[in-house]
Amino acid sequence: MNGAETLVKTFLAGGLDTCFANPGTSEMHFVAALDKHPEMRCVLCLFEGGTTGAADGYYRMAGKPAATLLHLAPGFGNAYANAHNARKAGSGIVNVVGDHATYHLKYDSPLKGDVAGITGSVSHWVRSSPDAPSVAPDGAAALAAARAQNGQIATLVLPANTAWEDAKEAAPTQALPPLRRPSEAAIKATAKALSAPGAALLVAGCGLHGQGAELAGKIAAATGCRLMADLFIPRIDRGEGAVDFERLPYPVDGIVELLEGTRHLILLGAKRPIAFFAYPGKPSTPEPADCPITELCGPEMDIEWTLHALATELNADEAEPRRIERHIPEAPTGPLTVEAAGAIIAAHLPEGALLVDESITASRIISPLTRHAAKHTGLQTCGGAIGGCLPIATGAAIACPDVKTIALTGDGSAMYTLQSLWTMARENLDVLTIVFANRGYQILHGELQNVGVTAPGRNASTMFDIEEPLLDWVALAKGHGVAGEKVTTAEAFSEAFLKATATRGPYLIELSL
């Protein structure tokens, strides 16, 4: 048995059974070890950014880490943006990064790079195995690190010779230390604070879906406090019957307005609200100047226990959360607009669907409409690096194969990781991709206005617009093995959406806006 084989056995014994891969020469012995274990699902992604994005989506829905397999420093470099997004989402991932054999590094071959530097800047845990006997215990430690503190990025660097040299056996699964919890005094003080006028509870993590969301809703109902969630969050229950959270908007002026009058902001699994960017004359922290902020429970702490403890302290078991009501918009007709598209999606969204939203500017219109659709799960790109939508949808669909996944993406965003369409086709994933083809990075027009430029010239326009030539998304999808169609009217989109959601398998609809 070699080091690579002990690593695969260690992962499988620890419950890690899915690997999103884009391997190269240095990883061939690990590939050979994977080949001996068909119980490990190996998913090829044609771009490294697809591996980390898919592992992010997988963790959000499966609740356990997947592995990625990447080739040296350049391979991890290509995967970096979606590793960053996954870190911001709090997703647990085990990256296996092949490296040159330890004795070959001194020759500075063309693919040698600063593996430690590039992986360490986005990973919570990094280790390079020094020899084959260390590979299995290092793999067990990486898996434990990925599971710790509600999800972390763990990266194991595997020099080629440590994969092919002899090793003895797999390593046992490592026990995780218990998550930290607030003190009893903190729970009592928070219960009192939430019952005071002007209190708001900002919730994240498992407090936004399932039992956690129910508890958060009961706490808000029992105290009368405002119940809030950030805009860019990994997972939330939405639609009819879901607990009603006020979502922070994107523009900093909107956050300031929403938080106006807040006298005490309590953070439970969430971080302090901040502006996405700095702007001249605008605040970085949008809460009122006299509003104290209390971090009851950090994102790395025991969020579920804290919710239970707070609900018990407040005797909130019988309280009824405020819930989202179903609104079915009237069927739109005529030329296709973002508003019409949102109404159609909201009216016909399948019950229980996964809705991955990176439609950027369109989302400001789409999201309020889909919020009142049938109950579903919402997922968003969390780190601000665009190109997360299609890979996240890929990983989520693999984690939940019996659920329809719908990916809402701008055309500019989708171009970052359109190779994910090929993976959807190969794996026959039940993903409907909807491309909002507005022919540009429309959000940047707004950002330019935010810094005072109201009449952009030729240089700015050519950097923001995706024209000359126009992207043909139906052709791009077909080239990756995914059938699709382009629609220009509300009636055509309604028909295409109903057909696609009633049919299993990957499909793409281009909305010409």
Image: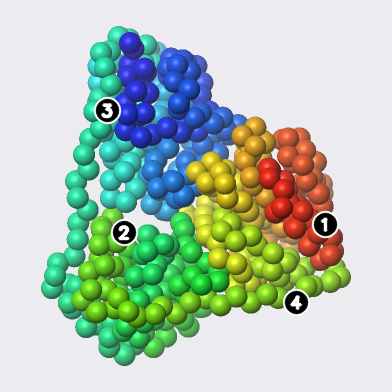
Judge by depth and name the residue closer to the eye, 71 or 148. Answer: 148
Q: Residues within 10 Å of mark 4 (few under 14, many from 20)?
A: few
Q: Which residue does the numbered mark 1 point to in the structure image? A: 487
Q: Distance between the residues labelled 2 and 4?
A: 40 Å
Q: Position of residue 450 (x, y in %)?
A: 58, 71
385 over 143 or under it: above or below: below
Q: How far apart are marks 3 and 1 (CA)?
A: 51 Å
Tag 4: residue type? Glu
Per the image, label 2 sits on a secondary structure element best described as loop
Residue 302 visible somewhere in the drawing: yes
Q: Which mark is residue 293?
A: none
Per the image, label 4 sits on a secondary structure element best described as loop
Tell me the residue at 38%/43% (across/down). Answer: 64
Q: Are marks 3 and 1 in contact (CB under 8 Å)?
A: no
Tag 2: residue type? Pro
Judge by depth and name the residue closer to the eye, 147 or 265. Answer: 147
Q: How far apart are marks 4 and 3 (CA)?
A: 57 Å
403 over 193 or under it: above or below: above
Tag 3: residue type? Asp
Q: Distance between the residues labelled 2 and 3?
A: 26 Å
Residue 157 as seen in the image, left or right of residue 295:
right
Q: Which residue does the numbered mark 4 point to in the structure image? A: 330
Tag 1: residue type? Val
